[in-house]
Image (cartoon, grey):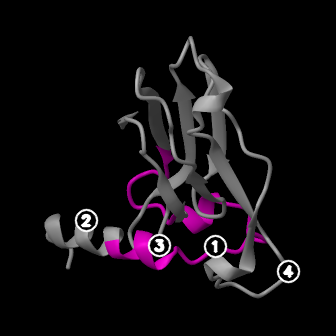
Amino acid sequence: MLSCYASGGAFPVHVDNHGGDDRRVYGAIYYMNPDYDEAAGGHFVPWRRRRDVGAALAPADLEPADAIAPRGDRLVVFEADTLAHSVRAYRDDAYRRYALTVWILAAEGVDPRDVLRPERRTLSPTDTHAGMADGERAEAGGG
């Protein structure tokens, strides 16, 4: 997926793999912003648990970790089912923020949970992302 953020572009806290038949195990984001200005924003923000709250999490159970600037030629790799993350608002009217995102998938017919470490617990997505996932499944005919 190639994303291009204009000024004001952002994305709320979410987890990429939202369960069901989602085969995404890892995500990788490559930033293509060679003349990036730190003041422009658009940072990738990983979120961590505030406390041990069991398998399901709500946004109130999370807090932001150190933000990662989308500097050119930077690669961020993360576990698609456990790392809640967001994108801060981009604030540059003269340039766009570009990122190429790819996902490493479990093989066809393999449950992604069998690929991941058994001690890890999958996070529940935010309501926003869950609604998006439901829409994607409905469009694909998966209900």
Q: Earlier in the sequence, mark 3 or mark 2?
A: 3
Name the element at disc 1. loop
Residue 13 seen in the figure: yes
Q: Earlier in the sequence, mark 4 or mark 2?
A: 4
Which residue was labeled with disc 1? 122
Tell me the kind of residue under disc 4.
Arg
Q: In this view, does 105 lie to the left or right of 76?
A: left
Q: Nearer the viewer, mark 4 or mark 3?
A: 4
Q: Which of marks 3 and 1 is nearer the N terminus?
A: 3
Q: For the view shown, which residue lies furthest in the front direction?
A: 93
Magenta-highlighted residues: 104-131
Mark number for residue 51? 4
Q: Nearer the viewer, residue 35 or 25?
A: 35
* Distance from the alpha carbon under mark 3 to that under mark 1: 8 Å
Which residue was labeled with disc 2? 136
Name the element at disc 4. loop
Mark 3, Cα crowd under 10 Å, few <14 / some 14-19 / many 20+, is: some
Image coordinates for residue 50, horizontal then vertical, percent: 83, 75
Q: Nearer the viewer, mark 4 or mark 2?
A: 4
Residue 16 seen in the figure: no
Would you say the residues marked 1 and 4 are in contact, meaning their CB atoms lie under 8 Å apart? no
